[in-house]
Amino acid sequence: MGSLVLIFLVAFTASLFLTAAVRAAARRWGIVDHPDGGRKLHKQPVPLWGGVAVYGATVLGLFAIRFGGASQAFVELSTAWMIAAGFVCFVGGLDDRYNLPARVKLALQITSVLPIILLGHDVDRIVAFGYPIELGWLGLPLTVLWLVGCINALNLIDGMDGLASIIGLSTAAMLGVIAASEGHPHVAAMAMVLAAALAGFLLYNLPPASIFLGDSGSMVIGLTIGLLGIQGTLKTSATLAITAPAVVMTLPMLDVIAAMVRRRLTGQRFDAPDRLHIHHRLLDRGWNPWQVLCVLGALCLTTGAAATAATIFRRDALAWIAAMTLVVLMARLRLFGHDEFALIKGVVLRGWNVFRDRILARNPAMESETVFEDAPPAEMWRVFLRDLQPWNIRQVDFSVSLGDRPRRLRWIDPASAADEHCHWSLSVSMPGRDDEICELRIAGVQPIAWAENAVALGRVLKAHGASFANCGERFFDALGVFEELAVVEIHPQPHRKAA
């Protein structure tokens, strides 16, 4: 395929000159991105259409390889890429200029990947942890879904100077190494050409950027990364080893999934722009653009290195452990993903409560006996407080007349302010073991939707209250244990004097 160093220099040099030319043309024609003081914080209008330069430089690099004597596999792959990437670059350029509707843009993205499918670069089978999975006819839509997902992943993460270029460059380099190790030199050569084109463009795109990729560039990079991920990890014809491409794309795909979760669970449109992407979160923490670039670039290299090592040593688990560790650490350190995990947790908790309430509605007595029969009072109390968590209860009172000694147990949320006043309360009464009258009352500060919650709360109170009442005197014999559970009052109620 000729000298790889010479090919790299051809693509790199072409990118330098084409970027300068496109920047001047975009400025002259008014294809610029204006600051808005919100999501777009650059100080002055910046030219777009940087993707045209990247696409042009990549095409020149690919033709240089073909003129130097390329294999048939390289010719077929590069032809499919040039057609698909050329169309997606055109679509991105239109979006940069006219701001296309989201549905139209998505339809055009799907159309752009069809040449790759029609020319036979789809997947019929995937291999995960050494086990093949036949896809059959599902291979076509899943290939389209992967390519369109990669296009939008790079498109969404392109919100800061140099970020999409850095991620595209590091990811292409890692996929090139993986392709070479798997015996796909034609894919490695294409990855090297894209990396060279991005390296030349990056000199103009580093903070403060003098030209932006625009959708014409981010979508081209995404499509190319998606195609390289498929072709560079093929075990046999149309058989894809899924681990490497999925792990390499951990960071961009995490940003996409988090955006979908965030917008879906907060009632926003999927295409609604916001300042909650990973780079925005880090900038809002006080990091400067260079710090964000270095950290996110290092994270992409880390997942890429893990995917490469897993491919070479045939240890898929190594790559997945690295990817999952990265995701968990970012959420735990509140760098990114913590709020989205909290939203998912809330949905799961509400779903569990609905499921539990339906079980209680069918047989409250059986549920009570299953959970509380012969349980220690302290454990019963812990379970009760846990079940009340979804409603943010501030105060709980349980009172019962045990013989001639009326007693009351009170719990107040230790996290609540001392001067907070309860705005609502709900109570249930039930007979005790010896016909005493027992009452369980809860009160809260934050308003709740009674139509949705009153019935569920009533069932919880009845189930737990019946269990407390059945315990009789021993429920009040564990004062020390209850104090550890933040119970602040447990005392006899005053006797009324006989008239």
Image (cartoon, rainbow, N blue to C red):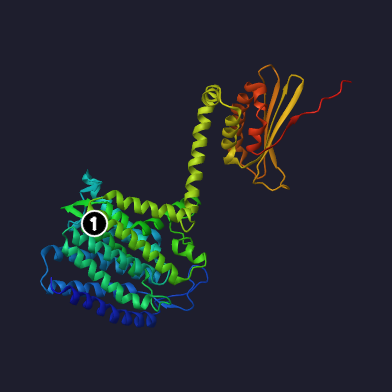
- x 39%, y 75%: residue: 206
Rendering quarter of residue 227: bottom left
Q: Callout 1: 10 Å neighbours few (<14), some, many (20+)? A: many
Res. 471 in view: yes
Between 179 and 444, which is closer to the camera in this rendering? 179
Q: Is residue 391 above or below residue 4?
A: above
Residue 452: give x, y in percent of width and height.
58, 38
Res. 263 in view: no
- x 48%, y 64%: residue: 282
Position of the N terminus by quadrant: bottom left
Residue pointed to by mark 1: 230
Residue 308: give x, y in percent of width and height.
26, 58
Q: Is residue 357 above or below residue 71?
A: above
Between 370 and 485, which is closer to the camera in this rendering? 485
Kind of element beneath mark 1? helix
Between 303 and 136, which is closer to the camera in this rendering? 303
- x 26%, y 56%: residue: 309
Q: Is residue 396 above or below residue 62?
A: above
| Residue at the extreme right of the image, as rendered | 499
Specify whether 238 is left or right of 330. left
Position of the C terminus by quadrant: top right
Query: What's the residue type where badge 1 is placed?
Result: Ile
Residue 338: give x, y in percent of width and height.
48, 53
Specify whether 148 is left or right of 457. left
Q: Is residue 156 above or below residue 356?
A: below
Specify whether 78 is left or right of 144. left
- x 35%, y 53%: residue: 322
Residue 186: give x, y in percent of width and height.
16, 64
